[in-house]
Image (cartoon, rainbow, N blue to C red):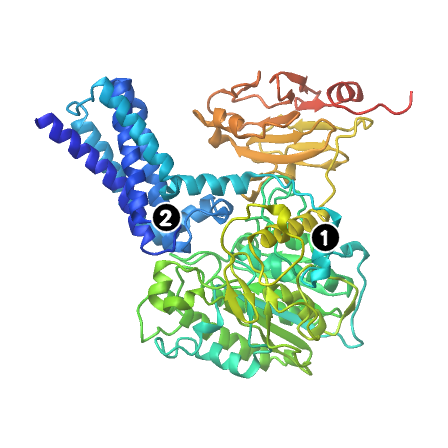
Amino acid sequence: MVRLILTLLAGAVLWTLLWLPVRDGLQDIEAAFSALDAALAALGITLLAWAGFSLGGRAWSLFWLIPLLVLLIVIRFTWYGLIQFTGMGFTVEFFIHLEWESIRIAWQEYGRLARRAIIAVGLLVLVAAALGRYIRALPSRLAWAGLIAGLVLVVLFREGMPERQLYQAWGKWSGAATVEVDPEVLQRWQDSGLVETAIRDKRRVSATPPDKPRNLIVLYLESVGVNLADREDWPDLMPRFTELLADHAWVDHVQTSSYITIEGLTNTLCGTLFPYLRGSDSLAGGGGLAERLPCMGDVLSKAGYHQVYLGGAGMSFAGKGRFLAAHGFDELKGMEYWREQGLRARAGKWGLSDTELFEQSLEEMERLREGDDPFNITLLNIGSHLPGYFYRECEAYPHGEAKFLQALHCTDQLLGQWVDAVRESGALEDTVVVITADHHVFPNPDMRELFGDDVEDRRLPFIVLGPDLPRPAVNSGAGYDTAPTVLDLLEIEHDASFILGRSLVEDPVRPDYLVKRYRDVHEGRVVNPSGRCDDPESVDEIEFPLGACERQELFAVLEEISRSFSAEIPVLDCSREDNRVRIAAEPGEPVSIYLGGAEQASRHAWRSREIDPAEPGLFLTEIDHSGEIHLRRFVPEGELSGDKAGELVDDLPAEAYKWLVAWNPEQTGQSIELPGWQIRLEADEPAAWLIDSESGRPVVVSESDESGSRVLWIGPEDCYRAFDQQRSGP
């Protein structure tokens, strides 16, 4: 009897740890499943665990069962933590931000929640250790019945499992861009007036400034919407922001076209909704996503503007620096640059403080005003990034203690001082200043507690200061209207077109419909296209508001247009004599992967971050049967320990034809085997291989040259033999 009670107690502890984080998370979001669904799914997992323990034998079951259950609990507490931060659980954005700096900041700001998860995991392990000897195994028949019942519950109520949401988000994130759109579909959307499909390559764009060109300063406020001004519940929260809206809001608002910061930049600067897909179309991976698409920076560059980006965060994350450099920016100054200048993040804060960022922008403005060329300074603050950062130069907000309220009040003070300084400098005589935001606050529980249902209000400011401004033709727009509108405010004549963006200076030519990532706006009202498109072929004509099938087709069109303007896919041309990999004998030297007439090593990425080609680790380059290079992935040496190496190979695209593998070790640690590939990564020996993905056998192997470096040369004979390319000439 005692053993039965202890067994039921262990099961109750497990079920509680699986269910509680999901139940608590559901209280803060609208979900497609209920707490009951989650409870029954957790019960199914508990039954499976008990059945597995009973059928597998006590010792062996605990060996694999405890780590698996710990993993599930960690996933569920992570899901709950994401809801507390973003209000949305596992999405594609989770993988975009999955990197060390985000983890460090999350621990710094949400350590209490993380400690709760650690305690829960520790509790599970302690219970298992204490009760493991006494947990009663089910008789064989009952164990099989429990196994079947558990499977039935998990299958029926799988929507109530965060693990399923994680799997679905991973599928979207890891999928390659393979969408192809019929020309008739493109024409249908062109005729709708919502989408411009006839886009001119940025290299063919021409732009002419007026006789007296005006400078431009664009300030992106982090997570600031128009409804944060003049609030009854939080009086005088942002008085200077309220004043700027009252006196200088050029239009009432623009609807956000982004959910995270990188979207806020790309979508507003390029006038579309970017598709964030991994692989060859990843910004961070250097695949050149929409690299030839005309963006505001490209037009300004053609018009002779010198362009500088200033930000408090690093430039490498999510390919932000690479994107800006590809679209006309001459100088990129993020945290990497500030460190070189002797500036550091303040204790307990992230990145360069807003105080110092605004000061640096004023110095930059004075420097550029002394030159002969017009300029564009674009800056993004981080003080109002969740959970919010307060700086010692600010006065505290007297009506609320919440960290984010203090951060907004501080941002408001620094914003007001910055605008005053710009005015006093005399810059507004020849400069247009645009103040907008990257996105609104995340609809997480903390923000809902502070602002209620207003977290769903996604309207952003569009404040403009400057001389002789034209009047808008409409009183609202979308974030992707920023680029064409700003170009018209500067009176720049150009022939660039934008996929979704339209100038708010001109009379409207599109339907009164604003498409967004999650919720659209039709005739001024927010609409939420719901449901699933069961018959994609059912779209014959475009009607507003859009339904599920129309939206699915629209996003396919947007993706196809962006892909058509991406960098040309490099090809391993077998007629070339210079296709090779070189890894220096001395550690610390950059790896060189020269294929298709271009260096590829710097275009590898790890978790949405650009990498240093000198960093120790594994460079993986996917090449298809015709020699096209599709995926460039880097894995740090430390990530290849234990079973991670096997998981790495399992995670690679199965349809790959050949893999070019370059191993640049730090010359420490253990040798590593990659299951399925007949190669071995030695801890002290750099090497490179061209591997046939089906057999796992090396086709070409690197050799040492006279300097001791390892060189893999894919000569014409080896290349023609390995790939389906036709030899030209004799």
Residue visible at 69% across and 23% down in the picture: 712
Residue 211: where, in percent of width, then height?
A: 80, 76
Above-or-below relation of 519 to 490: above
Q: Which residue is outermost to the right?
A: 730
Pick the quarter of the image with the C terminus: top right
Residue visible at 58% across and 46% down in the picture: 535
Answer whether residue 544 is visible to the viewer in this image: yes
User: Which quadrant of the structure image shows residue 510?
Assistant: bottom right
Residue position for label 1: 186
Above-or-below relation of 476 to 188: below
User: Which quadrant of the structure image shows residue 429?
Assistant: bottom right
Q: CA distance from mark 2 to mark 1?
A: 36 Å
Q: What amino acid does circle 1 point to?
A: Leu
- Horizontal placement of 350 versus 593: left or right? left
Residue at disc 1, secondary structure: helix
**Mark 1 and mark 2 in contact (Cβ < 8 Å)?**
no
Q: In this orientation, which residue lies closer to the viewer: 21 or 97?
A: 21
